Structures are given as structure tokens and as C-alpha cells.
Image (cartoon, rainbow, N blue to C red):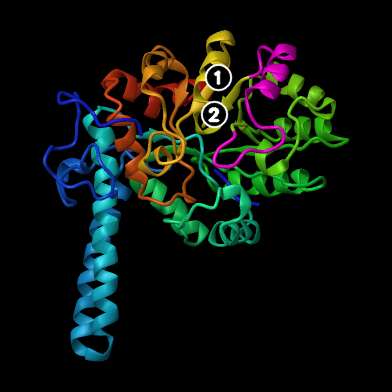
């Protein structure tokens, strides 16, 4: 989601977290996996570290650094309180990393593919965070603490330690004249971040088709469209040529078009239905499962074979409070398992990254479904 789960699992989930352990996410359902430090948590890593050795070594190196910090604190009692707080934070980070890696390792996956993560120019991201902090209208008035508020390199490192093989830079304009320079920034970000799928964006304005064409020439592999923040009709004729280019190129577009957490003038399934009627081969990925119009967007996916949905924030305790996924729709979700993609909204989430994974597991749709959603569907879509 942006500013400018289901019920508890049944007993028998094939790769469930150990039962009877408290869920650190603060909600019900499946509990977290074993504590950090288990050597079994080490496995294949990101595209930049296929063996996973750098990520695993990073956990050990962090532990060593914490030990050094403790020694320094002992020598200087005035800093002891700060060192203790840092050590606690380091231990929590290692436990969170272990939880995420244990999840995909137990599924026999080489890592995760996350199609909905946010990277953008720092000054733009800071404004997004400030909007969340101020409970801007598009947040629905919900308290939204940013769990992974950190510098860019630290955020990239966190995803790599989690074992996210490929991720995106979901950037988006809220006014004309903004998309093109965001795309220029994205070219440089993709060049220096090889495990990020080169992401571009668009806005209904004269010249949109031209700069989308240039983005494709520059190697864009996915686009982001934000109907809620941009407050535009996705069926606007100013976008028609751009949609055609993207359909012909087979390049996916992750689009926030549902009405959650706050509706917009052009959110909901009807405008997207008009786009798809003109461009049925367009590879739209409906963000947030289209919440809260889940069933309407599932219906569009059943009608259009290239329409996909991402899991971003859906099924989590946070979203279930205001937009619960209807359990009657779970069979349809299972049937569309080859077109559901893992998305998280990292770093702009108000809970640990692993909670999204646990929320998917407690749907109890089986290990094959989880493997497809958390890795295989994205890997196939992007040719990883």
C-alpha cells in the first residue's frame, strides 16, 4: 500500500511452524519457526549471492560484532545501556532473518521472489514515510509504523539476508511530469542492484507512450501503476498506447487499483475491466489481491488469463482487521495458484516481513501452493 489473514490454519499444514510457540507478529494463527542460530537456516541466497554464504556469514559476523560491542560497553559503563539496546536489536534481526529463511528452506525453495517492494529516490521515500507517520487520508487513518525504516543499502541488505532472490523497485508518480525522471533514477538503481528487477512507472499524460517505450529499451522488466495515489482512470486514452506497448512486450504491470485501505475516484474492478477489454493480453498484477474487492478481482483473473494478483499485505493480521479475505473465496484462490505472486510492500509494512509468509501458510492451501506463490510463479514470469 502507499501514502502521497485469513483464519487460522488447520492442524496438518505440511510445512508448518512449530505449534505451541507464541507468534511474535502479535496476531493469531501460525507461530514463528525455531530461534535464530540453527545451521539448517543457511541455504541459497539472493541473485547476488546464489550460494547463500554471504547472507549466512553476515549473520555470524553480526553476532561477532555484537560481542565486540558488549566488550566495549564493559570497558565504558556509560555506554552499557546503549550497547544492551543494540544487542537486543541485533538478536531480534537475526531471529527475524532465521524465521524467513527457515520458511523457504523447509519448502525446498532456493529463496523468495517478491514482486512488490519499494525503492525510490531517498527524498521521495522520506515523503512517503512522512505521509504514513501523519496518518494521511489514503492510509485510511490507520496507525502505520514503518518496520524497515533504514538507509537504502541497509534495506537491500535486509532483503538479501532474508534470501529474496529477486525484488522490485515499486516507484510511482502522483502528478504529471514525474514519471519520466523516476524512470531515469530507476535505470541507475537497476544497474547497481542486479537482484532488483528493473522497474519503471507511468502516468496519464502526453508523451507517456514515448517514455514507456524508452523504459522498455532501457531494459525495464516490470512497471508500477498507482491508481489510488495518482487519482487517475487507468482506462484514460492517454495511457492506451502505453498499455498496448506493454501488452506486446509481455512486460508485467503491478497496479494498485483496489479500494483499500481508502477508496479513490477510480479504484475498483470496473476501470480495470475496461482496460482489459481493450488489451486482454496485458499482464496486469493486481496489488494487494485487489483488497477489499477480492472476489471481483478474482473474477477478472478467471476471465483474463494474463491477469495476476499479488499477496501484498493481504491475509495479515493488520489487513484482516479492516479488509478480511472471505473464506468462501479460498477455493478460487487455490485454483488460481499459478497466477498468485508473493508481494510484501517492504519496507513500508507495520509488522515483520515473516508475518506475510506466516499469513500465507495459515491459509492451509498446501506446500505446492506456497512454493508456487512464494517463488515459482515469479521466477517463471520474469525468466529467473
Assess whether mark 2 and mark 1 are in contact (beta carbons under 8 angstroms): yes
On the question of residue 56 being in view, the answer is no
Q: Which residue is mark 2?
A: 290
In the displayed structure, 130 sits above or below 292; it is: below
Within the image, what quadrant is residue 370 found in?
top left
What residue is disc 1 on?
A: 296
Q: Magenta stretch: residue 277 in it?
A: yes
Secondary structure beneath dot 1 equals helix
Q: Position of residue 109 (x, y in %)?
A: 30, 28
- Gap between marks 1 and 2 measured at Cα: 8 Å
Relative to 146, 131 lies left or right? right
Q: Secondary structure at mark 2?
A: helix
Q: Which mark is residue 100?
A: none
For mark 2, does the 10 Å Cα neighbourhood hold few (<14), some (14 to 19), or many (20 or more) residues? many
Q: Is residue 201 left or right of residue 329?
A: right
Q: Which residues are magenta?
A: 259-282
Q: Alpha-carbon neighbours of circle 1 within 10 Å: few (<14), some, or many (≥20)?
A: some
Nearer to me, 45 or 369? 369
Judging depth in this view, the residue of 154 and 15 nearest the camera is 15
Relative to 157, 202 lies left or right: right
Amino acid at each position: 500500500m502507499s501514502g502521497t489473514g485469513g483464519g487460522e490454519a488447520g492442524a496438518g499444514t505440511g510445512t508448518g511452524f512449530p505449534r505451541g510457540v507464541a507468534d511474535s507478529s502479535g496476531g493469531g494463527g501460525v507461530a514463528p519457526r525455531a530461534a535464530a542460530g540453527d545451521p539448517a537456516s543457511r541455504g541459497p541466497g539472493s541473485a547476488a549471492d546464489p550460494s547463500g554464504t554471504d547472507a549466512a556469514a553476515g549473520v555470524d559476523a553480526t553476532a561477532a560484532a555484537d560481542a565486540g560491542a558488549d566488550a566495549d560497553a564493559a570497558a565504558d559503563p556509560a555506554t552499557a545501556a546503549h550497547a544492551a539496546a543494540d544487542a537486543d536489536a541485533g538478536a531480534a534481526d537475526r531471529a527475524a532473518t532465521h524465521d524467513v529463511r527457515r520458511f523457504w528452506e523447509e519448502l525446498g525453495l532456493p529463496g523468495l521472489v517478491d514482486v512488490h517492494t519499494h525503492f525510490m529516490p531517498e527524498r521521495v521515500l522520506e515523503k512517503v514515510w512522512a505521509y504514513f507517520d501523519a496518518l494521511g487520508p489514503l492510509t485510511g487513518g490507520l496507525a502505520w509504523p514503518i518496520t524497515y525504516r533504514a538507509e537504502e543499502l541497509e534495506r537491500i541488505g535486509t532483503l538479501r539476508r532474508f534470501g529474496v532472490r529477486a525484488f522490485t523497485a515499486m516507484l510511482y508518480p502522483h502528478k504529471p511530469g514525474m514519471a519520466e525522471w523516476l524512470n531515469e533514477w530507476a535505470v541507475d538503481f537497476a544497474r547497481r542492484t542486479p537482484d532488483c528487477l528493473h522497474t519503471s512507472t507511468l502516468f496519464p499524460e502526453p508523451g507517456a507512450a514515448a517514455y514507456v517505450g524508452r523504459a522498455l529499451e532501457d531494459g525495464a522488466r516490470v512497471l508500477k501503476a498507482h491508481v489510488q495515489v495518482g487519482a487517475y482512470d487507468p482506462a484514460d486514452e492517454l495511457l492506451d498506447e502505453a498499455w498496448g506497448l506493454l501488452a506486446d512486450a509481455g512486460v508485467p504491470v503491478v497496479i494498485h487499483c483496489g479500494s483499500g485501505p481508502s477508496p479513490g475516484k477510480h479504484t475498483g474492478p470496473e476501470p480495470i475491466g475496461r482496460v482489459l477489454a481493450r488489451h486482454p493480453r496485458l499482464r496486469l498484477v493486481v496489488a494487494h489481491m485487489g483488497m477489499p474487492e477480492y472476489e471481483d478481482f478474482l473474477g477478472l483473473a478467471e476471465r483474463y488469463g494474463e491477469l495476476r494478483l499479488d499477496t501484498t499485505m493481504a491475509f495479515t493480521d493488520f489487513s484482516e482487521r479492516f479488509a478480511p479475505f472471505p473464506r468462501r473465496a479460498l477455493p478460487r484462490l487455490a485454483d488460481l495458484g499459478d497466477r498468485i505472486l508473493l508481494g510484501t510492500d517492504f519496507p513500508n509494512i507495520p509488522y515483520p516481513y515473516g508475518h506475510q509468509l506466516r499469513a500465507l501458510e495459515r491459509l492451509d492451501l498446501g506446500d505446492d501452493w506456497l512454493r508456487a506463490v512464494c517463488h515459482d510463479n515469479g521466477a517463471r514470469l520474469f525468466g529467473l
